[in-house]
Image: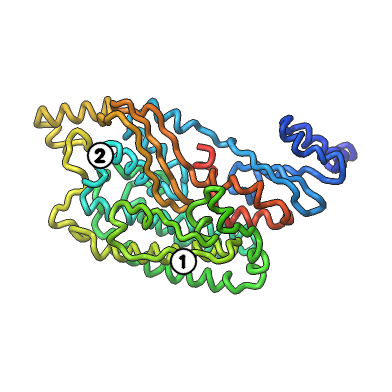
């Protein structure tokens, strides 16, 4: 028993020395003050408040952070290289695994990038555009609900987590009835969608919009004027407007610093120009502002959803037979009955499945305003059914780049609040 206790209660100096030995030569050089009065602390990669496999090497003077170095790559899967060996359609399931809290939005962003390469991005049927927008806004609400719940729990508020996950379960039910899957949806297709809305889906969505607003109000009642919450988030992790721009922040983290930049308005796509919504911005740029921006974004998403439900061409049951795919058999798979009875459709189906859509040579970049920020896809094509190169601009990866600038000067206890306010996901950060 005594021997076990000796192992469990080693002195902290020994652990600090072991941590220093585990660092790379460059990190050791940057943290050479460890031999003095400062200490190195490994936070992660399995710490609950790092929201995944993120490791941050902190240099501490007492409980004050003097240096911070994020260490990413523990979840690296090589998505961009995998894309070079797959047809454009075959890569759609991989986009689900980027920001896996908003797979529908990833599907739409990737499909729009390929459609821009094909030159059909402005030919999408109106019904397809409205359905895609509803998918994106449901994904935004779902992602923000999880971000809010885990953020509140990191700071010590457990009840909010239970509130937000109640509503997310309803979104998963909507995703399941729409796509057949709750989590990894793979719903879009190049040139359209895999299927139309099921019967009664718009009514379910309308009911959800009414209920989620009540839930958002309850969560705000618990947090917004809560003294503990305000003390833990106000004037903590302040990102000035110019610094946010310099570090390339996007999404709520940029808008929380007072920059009114939203790709849905700045570079409109789909049917967003036809919809009315506001872009919430912060004034201070602290953790509290980023929280308030996401709360208001959820309300604006509900506002967009309601407009889409009221205006969608064809209505709930699509009695007028509005198309959901571009009318091009060389891009979209032909109907099954025609594949079985006509030679031309059979050939198109065979070529599409085996070789992929025949994209022209060239390069394009398309970015969508995802829940975490600007999700961009750069595609370099030499022609044919597979990309020559594909680069993913992951907002979480870029947003995390500000940590070495942001964390120094804060206390260790502020780190969970700052990380929660940035609301990143390691699935798209590491790719």
Q: Quadrant of residue 225?
A: bottom right
Front residue of 1/155: it is: 155
Q: Is residue 287 above or below residue 74?
A: below
Q: For this view, does 170 lie left or right of residue 326?
A: right
Question: What residue sits 64% from the left and 39% below the top?
Answer: 71
Q: Residue 282: x, y in percent? A: 53, 65
Q: Nearer the viewer, residue 46 or 366?
A: 366
Instruction: Identify the coloring.
Output: rainbow
Measuring from the top left, give residue 186's x and y in whole percent.
35, 42
Name the residue carrying label 2. 119
The quadrant holding residue 285 is bottom right
Question: In the image as oriented, which residue stretches furthest toward the right?
Answer: 2
The residue that appears at 37% across and 43% down in the rendered structure is 366
Quadrant in the picture for the N terminus: top right
Residue 109 appears in the picture as rendered = yes
- The mark nearer the N terminus, 2 or 1, is 2
Residue 173: in sight, yes or no?
no
> Mark 2 to mark 1: distance in Å?
35 Å
What residue sits 72% from the left and 42% below the top? 42
Q: On the picture, is 192 further left or further right than 52?
A: left
Binning the other alpha carbons within 10 Å of mark 1 as few (below 14), some (14 to 19) or many (20 upward) gives some
Give the answer, above or below, for where 360 lies relative to 129: above
Task: Assign a secondary structure to mark 1.
Answer: helix
Quarter of image, res 233: bottom right
State yes or no: discs 2 and 1 in contact (Cβ < 8 Å): no
Q: Residue furthest left?
A: 342
Disc 1 designates what residue? 296
Residue at x 10%, y 27% (from the top left corner): 343
Q: In terms of secondary structure, where does tag 2 sit?
A: loop
Q: Which mark is residue 269?
A: none
Of circles 2 and 1, the one toward us is 2
Tally of numbered discs: 2
């Amino acid at each position: 028993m005594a021997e076990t206790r000796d192992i469990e209660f080693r002195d902290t100096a020994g652990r600090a020395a072991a941590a220093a030995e585990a660092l790379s030569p460059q990190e050791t050089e940057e943290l050479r003050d460890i031999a003095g009065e400062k200490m190195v602390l490994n936070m992660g990669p399995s710490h609950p408040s790092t929201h995944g496999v993120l490791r941050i090497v902190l240099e501490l003077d007492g409980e004050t952070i003097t240096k911070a170095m994020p260490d990413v790559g523990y979840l690296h899967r090589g998505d961009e290289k995998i894309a070079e060996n797959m047809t454009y359609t075959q890569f759609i399931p991989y986009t689900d695994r980027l920001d896996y809290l908003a797979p529908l939005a990833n599907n739409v962003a990737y499909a729009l990038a390929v459609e821009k390469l094909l030159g059909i991005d402005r030919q999408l049927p109106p019904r397809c555009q409205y359905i895609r927008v509803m998918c994106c806004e449901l994904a935004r609400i779902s992602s923000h609900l999880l971000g809010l719940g885990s953020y509140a729990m990191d700071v010590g508020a457990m009840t909010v987590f239970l509130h937000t996950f109640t509503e997310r379960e309803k979104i998963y039910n909507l995703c399941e009835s729409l796509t057949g899957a709750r989590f990894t949806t793979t719903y879009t297709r190049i040139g359209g969608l895999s299927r139309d809305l099921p019967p009664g889906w718009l009514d379910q969505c309308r009911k959800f919009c009414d209920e989620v607003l009540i839930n958002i109000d309850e969560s705000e009642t618990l947090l917004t004027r809560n003294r503990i919450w305000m003390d833990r988030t106000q004037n903590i992790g302040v990102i000035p407007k110019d610094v946010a721009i310099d570090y390339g922040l996007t999404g709520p983290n940029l808008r929380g610093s007072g920059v009114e930049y939203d790709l849905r308005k700045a570079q409109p796509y789909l049917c967003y120009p036809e919809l009315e919504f506001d872009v919430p911005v912060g004034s201070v740029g602290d953790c509290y502002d980023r929280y308030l921006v996401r709360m208001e974004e959820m309300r604006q998403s509900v506002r967009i959803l309601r407009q889409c439900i009221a205006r969608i061409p064809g209505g709930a049951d699509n009695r007028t037979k509005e198309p959901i795919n571009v009318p091009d058999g060389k891009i979209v798979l032909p109907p099954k009955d025609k594949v079985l009875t006509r030679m031309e459709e059979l050939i198109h189906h065979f070529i599409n499945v085996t070789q992929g859509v025949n994209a022209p040579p060239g390069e394009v970049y398309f970015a969508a305003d995802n829940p975490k920020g600007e999700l961009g896809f750069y595609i370099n094509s030499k022609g044919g059914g597979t990309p020559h190169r594909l680069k993913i601009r992951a907002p979480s990866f870029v947003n995390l780049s500000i940590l070495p600038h942001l964390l120094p000067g804060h206390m260790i206890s502020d780190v969970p609040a700052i990380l929660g306010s940035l609301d990143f996901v390691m699935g798209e950060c590491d790719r």
